[in-house]
Image: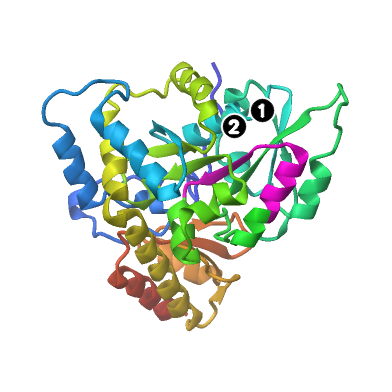
Amino acid sequence: MTSGPAPVSPYGTPSRRQEPAVTDPASSPRLPGFGSDNVAGISPAILKALAAANEGAMPSYGADAISARVEARFAALFEHEVKVLLVSTGTAANALALSVLTPPWGAVLCHADSHIENDECGAPEFFTGGAKLVHVPGVGAKIDPDALREAAQRNRGDVHCVQPSCVSITQASELGTLYSLSETAAIGAVCRQAGLPLHMDGSRFANAAAALGVRPAEMTWKAGVDILSFGATKNGAMGVEALVLFDPARAGELAFRRKRGGHLASKMRFLAAQMEAYLEGDLWLANARHANAMAARLASGLGGVGGAEIQGAVEANMLFVRLPQPMTDGLLAQGFRFYTERWGVGVVRLVTSFATSEADVDRLVGAARALA
């Protein structure tokens, strides 16, 4: 038996998706992690909700009262009739959503920098039975509507080619950029004209909503979105994502696909409890606003450090900075964690979360200033 290639590390040593192991956690100082919002813990309100859900017995597989309340909350939040299916990972949410939007011979039109293209290990292709991801260009990891209009008609009816079947956009994008309301609506208009359903990968939907300051309905179904992968894990949950279907007719097929794909949780109440607490009192927005504010503070601080160059505008909770190599090496040596070497020579990615404090930000800025 042969093994595959060793994973590549975001920090220059093994694994782009894993931080180096801490051999003695008790003796290791706590340093803020800026590699991803996934490194943060769980919001206290969500932990409390999980403890409450643990009391007594409840029906399984989503037949519990908490799951019913969650669907009602989503309907109120989006001002629209919806069907909601909960899963535990964003990969499952995206791949399952696409599985009901395209046949195996279909083309999923997406940006080359989208999460489904670069970070799902082929899950969309697997869950769709072989559909192909076809790139549509655009600046800032956002699909250009004119390019989409052309791609939506490419090879139509040609039995030798995959057929344009659906479109997927990422909000916020993998480069931290946001689709404005008009940009999403322009994509939605092209989709309607071409008869293509529109999926939105919203693993950081909360950060986008907080930054844009608009109602969720305006960002989604009113702009033509058919299915939303509504993320919570990156923003304070332990592990839950919601598939929000603005066309409830698709829910029957998706329910079977979720079960067949191994993502129907028997103790669904624990996923539902997380999501209910996440939506309660707009915790989802409060967490996202804080994360966005910490990113803005970090950008402001690093902008004043000699040798550090902020790349583009900071629109949500993610920023890209070009640093001198000695500064990058020095920060990593001190125990700070962030991704490197994926976005150009010297460019690092820094992500803040609901748990990032002002002291965390200032500590990184101070360390960078000392290394300048």
| Residue appearing at x 17%, y 51% in the figure | 26
What SS does tag 1 mark?
Answer: loop
Closest to the observer, 241 or 21: 241
As for residue 188 lying within the magenta part, the answer is: yes
| Residue appearing at x 79%, y 40% in the figure | 152
Magenta segment, which residues? 186-203
Q: Which residue is mark 2?
A: 98
Q: What amino acid type is highlighted by mark number 1? A: Thr
Closest to the observer, 180 or 116: 180
| Residue 141 shows in this picture | no
Height in image: 296 above or below 189? below
Height in image: 311 above or below 262? below
Number of callouts in the render? 2
In the picture, the disc for residue 102 is 1
Which quarter of the rendering shows the N terminus?
top right
| Residue appearing at x 70%, y 55% in the figure | 186
| Residue appearing at x 46%, y 36% in the figure | 243
